[in-house]
Amino acid sequence: MTQSDANVHPRLDSPDYRSTTLRHPKQPLIYLPHGPAELTGPQLDELRCGELDNDLTRQHAGEPIGERMTVSGGLLDGDGRPVRDSLIEIWQANAAGRYAHRWDRWPAPLDPNFTGAGRTVTDADGRYTFTTIKPGPYPWGNHPNAWRPAHIHFSLMGPQFHQRLVTQMYFPSDPLFAYDPIFQSVRDPKIRERMIARFSLDRTQEQFALGYEWDIVLRGPQETPIEEAH
Amino acid sequence: LNETPSQTVGPYLSLGLPWKDGPVADPDGVTITGTVFDGNGAPIPDALIETWSPAPRAFARSATDDDGRWSVVVPMPDAGYLTVNLFARGLLHRLVTRVYLRGEPDDPVPVDRRHTLVATPDGVIHRFDIRLQGDDETVFFDI
């Protein structure tokens, strides 16, 4: 049994990231022992991801502009066991740092060949792979001259509902790390490194794409999952 | 092992997370709808709600619209309540709450805050607003 480490996650009230000010609960969270609802979870592999859902470079007529890359790794639980048949969803900006979203007003070019969303289900060894292009950094309004380091958003389900995680994957040696209050909201520098993918020449495909590796570790599991009532 | 830290979904979560039939776990189920409010009482248009109940299975997912409103259609849970995940820009970690369609929470939820977890019947639908701060701040759980 592995407890979630309270130092791993950011504080909900992180004033340097201004949007937290009006959006964090002021009352303390109420501790709830795990019951059937927490120890079970939706099995979403029945979503039947399409064959190309994990290739963000092949969702349109042409190829997106940018640095073609793959990101692959293992989805693990807190005991180091692979989490198989588990849905992973990603979304990201294009190579110019622009999201294909109607609210993104940053005047960098949209790419007609890039939507920036993908999904996959982990295999029998708990592994996943996405093919995409490297997202660009982009400015935002948090403070003067604020820029987000390049990142890919990741959503992980895990087998038990309490293991649900949404996070962001960053790239090695980004010069913007020191100035980004979202990255810095994880206070321990050693723990922040867990959000940074590793460049891998082994995973790099000759004449095709740079390879990055990133393992994702969920909390738990807690006890044996309770069987469903039916 | 080295647990991966949480980060916010950011403002563009609707690019990646909603799917077409995501809000409907059971077309013949009950509709729950509500608005997510910030500490100024302003609706939050970049949030995502997920519901879960194991019996019967009630996983549904709905992003909030421009008015901060979400809606799901789920089977009536045997336990009377659904577990709810809330994600949003400005939330560095998901919040967990519950919506009671029958009955109301008991310990450890303080008596004077239990009403924040109870949906209000409104014709054939159930209304459930979520308030991140303020006098009627919704109860959130550490699970």
Image (spheres, rainbow, N blue to C red):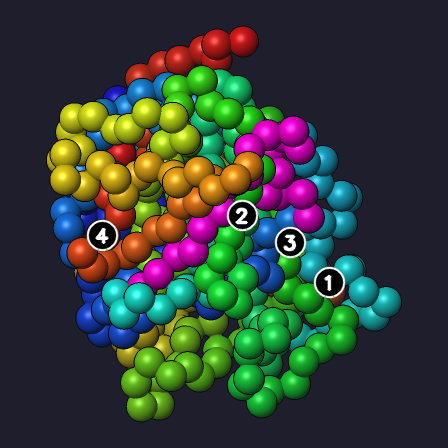
Q: Is residue B101 left or right of residue B135?
A: right
Q: CA distance from mark 2 to mark 3?
A: 24 Å
Amino acid residing under circle 2 = Ser
Amino acid residing under circle 3 = Gly
* Residue highlighted by disc 3: A118
Callout 1: few (<14), some (14-19), or many (20+) C-alpha neighbours within 10 Å?
many
Q: Which mark is residue B71?
A: 2
Task: Give the residue drawn at x 53%, y 29%.
Answer: B58
Task: Give the residue drawn at x 14%, y 47%.
Answer: A28
Residue A150 is situated, as x and y percent measured from the top left of the image, at: 47, 71
Residue A99 is situated, as x and y percent measured from the top left of the image, at: 58, 73
Residue B119 is situated, as x and y percent measured from the top left of the image, at: 38, 39
Segment colored magenta = B20-38
* Residue highlighted by disc 1: A57
Callouts 1 and 2 in the same chain: no
Q: Earlier in the sequence, mark 2 or mark 4?
A: 2
* Residue highlighted by disc 4: B136
Amino acid residing under circle 4 = Asp
Callouts 3 and 4 in the same chain: no
Q: Is residue A82 visible?
A: no
Residue under mark 1: which chain is it in?
Answer: A
Of labels 1 and 2, the one closer to you: 2
Q: CA distance from mark 1 to mark 3?
A: 10 Å
Q: CA distance from mark 1 to mark 4?
A: 46 Å
